[in-house]
Image (spheres, rainbow, N blue to C red):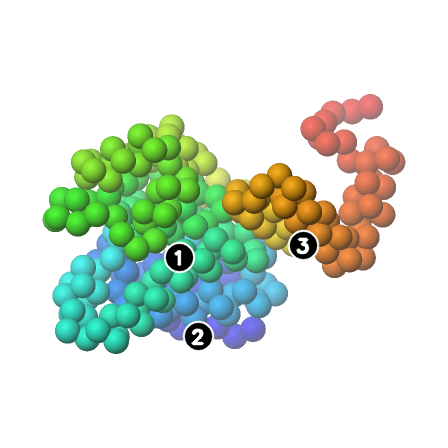
Amino acid sequence: MDLPAYETILLERNVAPGVTLLTFNRPEKRNAMSPRVHEDMTDALERLRGDDDTKVLVITGSGPAFCAGMDLKQFFIELRDQPYEYDRITRLAVEWRGRTLRTYPKPTIAMINGFTFGGAFSIAEGCDLAFAAEDAVFGLSEINFGMFPGGAVSKSLARIMRPRDALFYAMTGKTFTGQQAAEIGFINAALPAGQLRDYTLEIAGLLATKDPHALRAAKEAYKHSEVMDWDAAMSYSGALERMVTLAQQDAWRNQGIGDFLEHKYRPGLEGRQG
């Protein structure tokens, strides 16, 4: 599949086998999300959904920032007197971060290399996994100019942060580091900046070797079970198992369990002999 050149993002396929790197590319604006960013992201995510060369998607930022949130001037000021355009861009902004990323059929990883503010919290939360540089800086600065973390951000905070942490940072506007983000569970892990790319691509490369049907089902089973009661979750999981079995043509039993029975694969005992 041919991919277009975008104004605000860069796409690189096969940075590791099966891994595509998507980079926000407005370094002079700390990768703040302009209306064009939302249009580019909406288009790119739709195209990559059907791209056979993209098995895992990693999202990062160019320069010293991951993403500084919304471009306040272009989004809130320049569109203030254009209600229909403001509504259109708002819907794009909420949709790709709040729904598209959360339900994406392929694994997604946020590689947080620097400043991450406001609306960027929903990108980090929307991705399946997130790794950050230890010295990355996170912040919800909306309260500092008389607003609150609106749009998709408050929902993201409620989903992934502990109540005391979410309210503390939302109400004070204080920043926290990548190391602190790992300690409170907002991200999976924090690493020295020089190790972030290699480690993230290592994990992405590992995911790219897994069965895509099983990966998608793992995501859907977890995310939908969050809002289901026990009986509904059991029924949904059973339906997903049948779907995966059909899509794989029973490979998980014939090859997967077969390898286990023949001692070619021993869960939890990789690397051991005997």
Relative to 234, does residue 2 appear above or below in the rendering?
Answer: below
Q: Secondary structure beneath disc 2?
A: loop
Which amino acid lies under the numbered mark 3 shown in the image of this protein? His
Q: Badge 2 is on which residue?
A: 4
Above or below residue 186? Residue 268 is: above
Task: Judge from the rendering whether residue 76 lies leftward or rightward of residue 87; answer left or right.
Answer: left
Residue 225 screen position, x and y as percent: 57, 44
The answer to which of marks 1 and 3 sits earlier in the sequence is 1
Q: Which residue is mark 3?
A: 213
Q: Amino acid at mark 1?
A: Arg
Q: Nearer the viewer, mark 2 or mark 3?
A: 3
Q: How dense is the environment of label 1, judged by Cα within 10 Å: few (below 14), some, or many (20 and up)? A: many
Q: Which residue is mark 1?
A: 97
Do the numbered discs 2 and 3 sit on residues whose CB atoms are within 8 Å?
A: no
Measure the alpha-carbon separation of dots 1 and 3.
23 Å
> Amino acid type of disc 2?
Pro
